[in-house]
Amino acid sequence: MNKKLIAAAIAAVVAAPAVSAADTTLYGRAHIDVRSESNGKVDNYTVNSNSSIIGIKGSEDLGDGLKAVFKYELGYDMADTDKAGALGALAGGASPLSGRDAYVGLSGGFGTVIVGRSSTPAKIAWYAAGNDHMGDTIADFNEVGFTESRVDNAIAYISPSFSGFTVAGAIVPGEQKGTAPANAGADNNDGIADHYSIGLMYAGGGLKASLGYEKVADAADIAGVTTDAKMVQASASYTFGDFTIGGSYEKSSNLMTIKGQDKKVWGISGKANFGNNYVAANYGTADFDMGAAGSDDYTTFAIGVGHKFSKRTQVYAAYSNRDGGGAASPIKLNEDYSAFALGMIHTF
């Protein structure tokens, strides 16, 4: 059955009257793996739902090149829907549903403006660089330690493409009263742009590149202890024929707005396509400097192979290893973690 017809039927049941002259699409992804894991102490077998989602998105033509746009997207745990035992969420456990992007906005020749919950422009830029070849699997490139955020209350803008360049920016109000005394350990953020994120992207001639920057305002306001957290990322990839190679670098300062807690991450990734089959791999290191608590680092390696039955359905096998930390690790890391997974992804 046509997906647009299904989405229209759902809209008619949930909210009446249904919006006319609107382009509405029901979409989703079902992603399950069976995994063998070991952390050097315990071996385990698990079944996992990996960012399985369902959503509705669409637009309405308002004339003169202007459109209204919207999106409602939810994550759904297909493997562990009963989070609290027999009664699940009714017994006070966590719901299998999780909030993802959900917004409304306007789009036209000027670009797109949206308001709601959305991925930050820095996250959008990081993915636009084309280095994450097995996203949401155990071979996901962000497992190296790269930062990616989705935020509530975002007011975001995405520009049209200019000769391959696109700019995105978002501001996020602190939503606090702003009446707390200074240095009292209480959130004093009451501006419209207390937090913000920027992304610059380029695509052309096989090259994809991006820069991302984010600032999270200090909420505690404790002199000498807390300050604004900042993060910058630079990424690029190059595709030649059936091969892609690239890398990313991140520098984060004042993690969790604690002054002097810093992180540096770098990683390289690549992918080779052979008809309907592919091989992808990545490698990288995350270094943490936690101030007086000390420093630590870990290294991640992952490789995967996959087969695409169609544009919508694929199966894969992947292996991942993360090694680092010690008994006195300031990031609570003391492991030699490895995992092997067999998974299947279907999108609609």
Image (cartoon, rainbow, N blue to C red):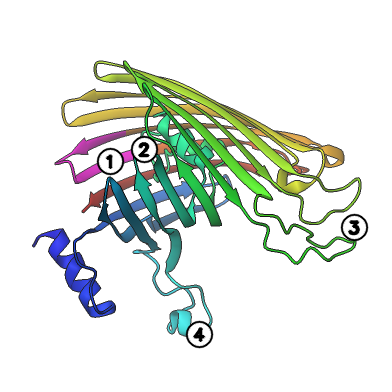
Mark sitting earlier along the chain (1/2): 2
Q: Magenta stretch containing residue 310, yes or no? A: yes
Name the chief secondary structure element in magenta: strand
Q: Which image quarter holds the N terminus? A: bottom left
Mark sitting earlier along the chain (3/1): 3
Viewer-proximal residue, 72 or 294?
Answer: 72
286 shown above or below 327 = above
The residue mark sitting in front, 4 or 3, is 3
Q: Which image quarter holds the C terminus? A: bottom left
* CB-based contact (under 8 Å), mark 3 and mark 1: no
Mark sitting earlier along the chain (4/3): 4
* CB-based contact (under 8 Å), mark 4 and mark 3: no
The residue mark sitting in front, 1 or 4, is 4
Mark sitting earlier along the chain (1/4): 4
The residue mark sitting in front, 3 or 1, is 3
Q: Which structural element holds mark 2?
A: loop
Q: Residues within 10 Å of mark 2 (few under 14, many from 20)?
A: many
Pointer 4 residue: 91
Where does the magenta region start and end?
305-317
Q: Which structural element holds mark 3?
A: loop
> Residue 339 placed where, x, y %?
45, 43
Tell me the CA gap for discs 1 and 2: 9 Å
The residue mark sitting in front, 2 or 3, is 3
Viewer-proximal residue, 321 or 70?
Answer: 70
> Residue 62 placed where, x, y %?
27, 55
* CB-based contact (under 8 Å), mark 1 and mark 4: no
The disc placed on residue 316 is 1
